[in-house]
Image (tube, rainbow, N blue to C red):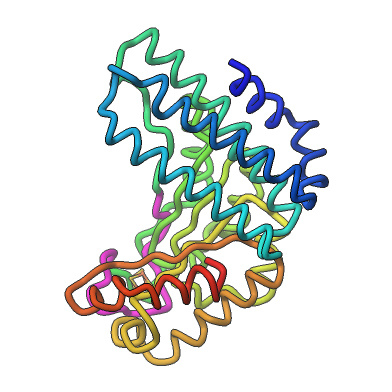
Amino acid sequence: MAVLTTARVLSHPRTADLISTLVENTFVRKFVVKALEKEVYKRAIVENVGKRLRRAQEDKFYMVRSMIYALDRAFRDGLISPRMWGKIFKVFVGNIFVNDTEWRDAFVARHGQGSAPPAFITISPGKRCNLQCVGCYAGSTAADAEKLEYDLVSRILRDKTEKWASHFTVISGGEPLMWRSQGKGILDLAREHQDNYFLMYTNGTLIDERVAEEMAELGNISPAISVEGFKEETEERRGKGVYERILRAFRNLRKVGVPFGISVTATRFNVDTLTKDEFWDFYMLEQGA
Ligand code: SF4
């Protein structure tokens, strides 16, 4: 109960504002990280004893815990700005972690296990892309065809937020940063839906300084940038010159404190690289993913 209360207090808008300024203090940040870890453990494991498979719940706990620790490390190393941290608190902890989870628990209590609507959606607003990767899963091209209009995408987000208590949105593609409709793009969507946190799968080549700065100003969108390994594997599939543009995107994001991840497709061609410590050390420790 004490832990639940802690999470609720931490995610209150006023407390979150205060914490976003205090979080530079290592002691405060450590306290917050510990409180979150305890709450995740309670919700994932303690409250599900006898209800869900323990191993599956443990996997969920370890996944969320590693995200919390990755964010802590990113902040400690100066890779995440106080504004982003504040937004992560309000939206991730407040909306997604506390409010959405409580809504979902109440829904299940009323309608039974397995009845709750999805906690998030993945939406691909358009198929257009500036690359031509070998074996593109989306069959993308440079043509501005097969896309959803901005108003429709925005309405889908509004509906799932209001009706499903879902404040997390995954954007896929095509290349999301090439999607334009009704004079707007993906960052306008993040601006309009400030109560959502967006994870955007992107090839990263269009994240220049201006785009990175806009993401930092918005505070509610993080990119997961595709790599296939190191330069050789990445350019083999994605094209010559792409790797340098990806490293440039990492630099631009680090500079303004936007947390980012990498997205990797394991194949028989890159599995040896992906299973080496060197690969993970490079992206996680050197590049700050
Ligand atoms: S970046 Fe993604 S969407 Fe674009 S061609 Fe490559 S795999 Fe397809």
> Where residue 54 sits: x, y (%)?
29, 29
> Where residue 277 sits: x, y (%)?
37, 73
Above or below, 40 against 221 in this view is above
Question: Looking at the magenta stretch, what is its main secondary structure?
Answer: loop
Q: Is residue 137 magenta?
A: yes
Above or below, 172 against 238 in this view is above
> Where residue 217 sits: x, y (%)?
73, 58
Left or right placement of residue 214 versus residue 169 in this view: right
Q: Report the residue at 77% width, 45% height from top.
A: 20
Give the residue furthest to the top.
110
Name the quadrant where ligand 1 sits. bottom left
Q: Report the residue at 70% width, 72% height from top.
A: 255
Give the residue furthest to the bottom.
240
Q: Report the residue at 64% width, 75% height from top.
A: 252
How many marks do you count on the picture? 0
Q: Quadrant of the N terminus?
A: top right
Left or right placement of residue 59 versus residue 182 in this view: left
Left or right placement of residue 268 versus residue 261 in this view: left
Q: Report the residue at 30% width, 87% height from top.
A: 236
Above or below, 59 against 57 in this view is below
Answer with the quarter of the image where residue 228 lies: bottom left
Could you say which is closer to the camera, residue 78 or residue 220? 78
Above or below, 9 against 172 in this view is above
Could you say which is closer to the camera, residue 37 or residue 94? 37
Left or right placement of residue 258 versus residue 150 in this view: right
Q: In the rendered structure, which segment of residues is drawn in magenta?
A: 123-138
Give the residue furthest to the left.
268
Answer with the quarter of the image where residue 256 lies: bottom right
